[in-house]
């Protein structure tokens, strides 16, 4: 087939394809009023209906805050909590670790 025939044959083929695609449309699709009558009415629910605005925490005196820290055990207690190992098998985000096999460790466990 030569190039000049391709120039006029391509648009003709596209128009024919579009006409056939339109001819295959079902009559039920052109009359949606029958299906709307039996369908339930749509309802609207606001996405921000349950929004709770920010409420600032009450400010306490620095002496009361220091007393509370002393009752808990002071800064050393907080440091001990930070040093505690996380639950085995969990990363810092709390997600379960997945073991992947490596070339020298085919079982997938940690070396």
Image (cartoon, rainbow, N blue to C red):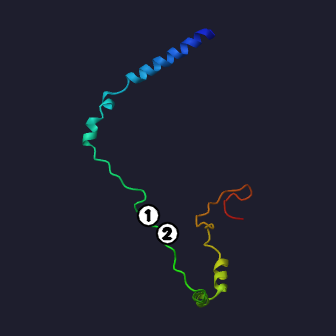
Residue on which disc 2 sits: 54
- Relative to 29, is 17 on the left or the right? right
Q: Residues within 10 Å of mark 2 (few under 14, many from 20)?
A: few
Tell me what residue is drawn at x 30 percent, y 35 percent. Answer: 32
| Whether residue 69 is situated above or below residue 111 in the rendered picture | below
Say which quarter of the image contains residue 98. Answer: bottom right
Q: Residues within 10 Å of mark 1 (few under 14, many from 20)?
A: few
- Work out whether residue 1 can be spotted: no
- Relative to 75, is 68 on the left or the right? left
Residue on which disc 1 sits: 51
Tell me what residue is drawn at x 47 percent, y 18 percent. Answer: 15
Which percent across, then down, holds residue 19? 42, 19
- Work out whether residue 44 can be spotted: yes
Which percent across, then down, holds residue 40? 28, 47
Q: How far is disc 2 from disc 1 in space, using C-alphas? A: 9 Å
- Relative to 5, is 17 on the left or the right? left
- Locate the C terminus and report the quarter of the image it occupies: bottom right
Tell me what residue is drawn at x 42 percent, y 56 percent. Answer: 47
Which type of secondary structure does the marked residue at label 2 adopt?
loop
């Amino acid at each position: 087939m030569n190039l000049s025939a391709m120039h006029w044959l391509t648009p003709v083929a596209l128009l024919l394809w579009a006409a056939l695609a339109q001819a295959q449309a079902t009559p039920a699709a052109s009359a949606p009023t029958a299906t709307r009558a039996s369908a339930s009415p749509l309802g609207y629910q606001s996405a921000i209906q349950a929004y709770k605005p920010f409420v600032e925490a009450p400010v306490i005196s620095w002496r009361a805050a220091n007393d509370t820290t002393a009752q808990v055990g002071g800064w050393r207690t907080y440091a001990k909590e930070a040093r505690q190992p996380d639950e085995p098998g969990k990363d810092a985000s709390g997600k379960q670790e997945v073991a992947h096999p490596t070339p020298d460790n085919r079982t997938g466990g940690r070396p």
